[in-house]
Amino acid sequence: MFEGLESPDARRAGDIFAVWRKILLGIKSTVNPNEGANLAAHSRIVDIKSGVLLVEADHPGWIELLQLRKNYILKGLAMYAKDVPVQTLAFRVAGKRGNVTGSSYSIEEARGLAESRLDREEAALAKAMPRAPAESKAASRPQEEMAPELSQALAALGRDMGVPL
C-alpha cells in the first residue's frame, strides 16, 4: 500500500490510521459506552484524495453511525491530523467497489445524481409530512379539545423541529 511513498508520506499515512482509531475511541454514548470502540473495530480508512477520506465499514449500519458522528470525526481529524487536509468523509460497505481516486463519474455527473436523490428524498418527505390545516380534510371538522399539557408538548416539539404543529 505504501509502495512509492516517500518516508514522510508513509509516516503521515500511518499517522492518519492511528488518529482515526484515537478519534473513534473518543466517542462515548450514554446508550452504548463502547460505541467508539465498536466503530473502530468495524471501519477502516481506504483512501484519501482531494480532501475526501474514504472509509470502509463492515455493514451499512456502521456507516450510518459513522455518518451521525461525521462532524465529531472531522473536528478530530482537523485537530490531530493537521497536515492531512480532510474536508469530508465518504463511505462504502466492505467488499463493494468504489474509490476516491478512480471515480467513474465526473463532478457534474455526481452532482446531478446527488441532486436527483435529494429531489426524491424531498418529495418523499413532503408526502410524509402532514399538510397544513387549510389543506387537510381535518380542517373542516371541529377540533376536539386537547389537554393543555399535550398542547404545550406538541408546541415545544414543533419549535424544536422547526415545524408548526
Image (cartoon, rainbow, N blue to C red):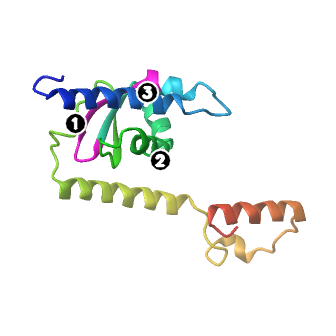
The residue singled out by tag 1 in the image is 99
Q: CA distance from mark 1 to mark 2?
A: 22 Å
Nearest to the eye among marks 1 and 3: give it: 3
Tally of numbered discs: 3
Residue at position x 50%, y 36% in the image: 65
Circle 3 SS class: helix
Q: CA distance from mark 1 to mark 3?
A: 21 Å
Tell me if 54 is positioned left or right of 162 in this view. Answer: left
Q: Quadrant of residue 77?
A: top left
- Quadrant of the rendering where the C terminus is positioned: bottom right
Is most of the magenta stretch helix, strand or loop? strand
Label annotation for residue 17:
none
The outermost residue toward the front is: 8
Circle 1 SS class: loop
Q: CA distance from mark 2 to mark 3?
A: 16 Å
Using the image, determine if residue 80 lies above or below residue 38: below
Nearest to the eye among marks 1 and 2: give it: 2
The residue singled out by tag 2 in the image is 71
Label annotation for residue 21:
3
Residue at position x 75%, y 66% in the image: 155
- Percent x, y for residue 128? 55, 58
For disc 3, the neighbor class at 10 Å (few under 14, some 14 to 19, many from 20) is some
- Callout 1, which amino acid? Asn
Span of residues in magenta: 40-52
- Callout 2, which amino acid? Asn
